[in-house]
Amino acid sequence: MANSELLSALTVLEKEKNISRDTILATIEDALLVACKNNYGSYDNFSVTMDSETCEYHVFAAKEVVEEVFDPVIEISLEEAHEIDGSFKMGDIVNVEIKSQNFGRIATSAAKGVILQKLKEEERNLIYSEYEGKAHTIITGTVSRYIGKNISVNLGKTDAILTENEQIKGERYNTNDRIKVYVLEVRNNPRGPRIRVSRTHPDLVRCLFEEEVSEVREGIVEIKGIAREAGNRSKIAVWSNDPDVDPVGACVGMNGSRVNAIVNELGNEKIDVVEWNENPAMLIENALSPAKVIAVVADSDEKTAKVVVPDYQLSLAIGREGQNARLAARLTGFKIDIKSETQAREAGDFLDYEEEYDDDEYFDEEEYYEETSAETEATEE
């Protein structure tokens, strides 16, 4: 039977829900079979055919030709079979069309329920498939509402949860604020996809640089490491695969335009961009930026390092509440012991550095002598 209303509804579902026509038709077929079961007590011998272009559908019951009918659901008399086709004989199987209009109210209601349930499941699966591919990337959402201390973020087709632990401390959000979040996890469940997002994850910084800096996006500049204390400060170590491209300059941008755009997105979180170096001592010196470093002795086996800085740079090297040193340690993977020049002299550190240093160690001789030459000359006099 042709069904113009069904065809119209199918077209709307295709456009609004983005569910394929074949999926919808298969759902309707399943629903009709459920209706057969509710109406006749079984559907093992029932089948449905549908035309995807016209939505014309037919329901058939396969019945065996018998001499005496005991179960009209699965059997048909020879006389009735001959009314369909005179060539049928005893034992043949006859496909008898069932008029779906004759289905009872309960059967029809059950069929409708199956269709709605299947379509909801398909819609949830489509949304899950779409957002599953966005795990470990950043996405822009809109603050929808607060759920306790958690925030519901609308991503377009579904909502994500920004838990209190994944929010930047001190950052305030208002309804309809647009924010960028890092997708931690996408899980499927009976109520639909569950998406957890973060504003504190270090990879949020990585993804923001990939968006903002074309050299990072194209792989010319690599991000080798990130250490972050969300809302306060991040350190990012970068390396260039092209000797003509300055990795730090590319990430900072002209007059700081690129890094400032990321700083603004993160609520004025400070970002130190330093150059990666395979030499641990050089990397540690870079990681302690903006502090100046006189000397570094790094033990690659023990993952420890001793650092000497000018007296006036000690507080800068350590940072407020130890933050600068702590982030440098995370970025490099070394436990760092920082001393001022005076402290190092009093402790007798680095007195015989020329004999003691090997390939894994580093000492900035030129800078060291610049800082100490005046004092040495005065002592000799």
Image (spheres, rainbow, N blue to C red):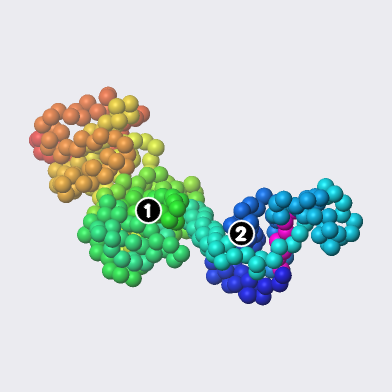
Dot 1 falls on a residue whose secondary structure is: strand
Q: Please indicate whether residue 321 sits to the left or right of residue 190 in the image.
A: left
Front residue of 227 and 184 = 184
Residue span colored magenta: 56-62
Q: Give coordinates of residue 194: x percent, y percent.
A: 41, 54
* Amino acid marked by disc 2: Asn
* Amino acid marked by disc 1: Arg
| Magenta-drawn stretch contains 99 | no
Q: Which residue is mark 2?
A: 39
Q: Give coordinates of residue 111: x percent, y percent.
A: 57, 62
Using a 10 Å C-alpha cutoff, classify the residue at mark 2 as few (fewer than 14 neighbours), some (14 to 19) or many (20 or more): some
Q: Please indicate whether residue 346 sits to the left or right of residue 54 in the image.
A: left
Q: Which residue is mark 1?
A: 196
Q: Residue at x 36, y 29 (%)?
A: 359
Q: Residue at x 25, y 34 (%)?
A: 335
- The quadrant of the rendering that contains the N terminus is bottom right
Using a 10 Å C-alpha cutoff, classify the residue at mark 1 as few (fewer than 14 neighbours), some (14 to 19) or many (20 or more): many
Above or below for 34 versus 367: below
Above or below for 5 versus 29: below
Specify the principal SS of the magenta part: strand
Q: Residue at x 35, y 47 (%)?
A: 226
Front residue of 330 and 230 = 230
Q: Is residue 215 visible?
A: no
Q: Please indicate whether residue 319 sits to the left or right of residue 18 in the image.
A: left
Q: Of label 1 and label 2, which has the lower sequence position?
A: 2
Front residue of 2 and 355 = 2
Dot 2 falls on a residue whose secondary structure is: helix
Q: Are marks 1 and 2 in contact (CB under 8 Å)?
A: no
Q: Residue at x 61, y 53 (%)?
A: 41
Front residue of 81 and 221 = 81
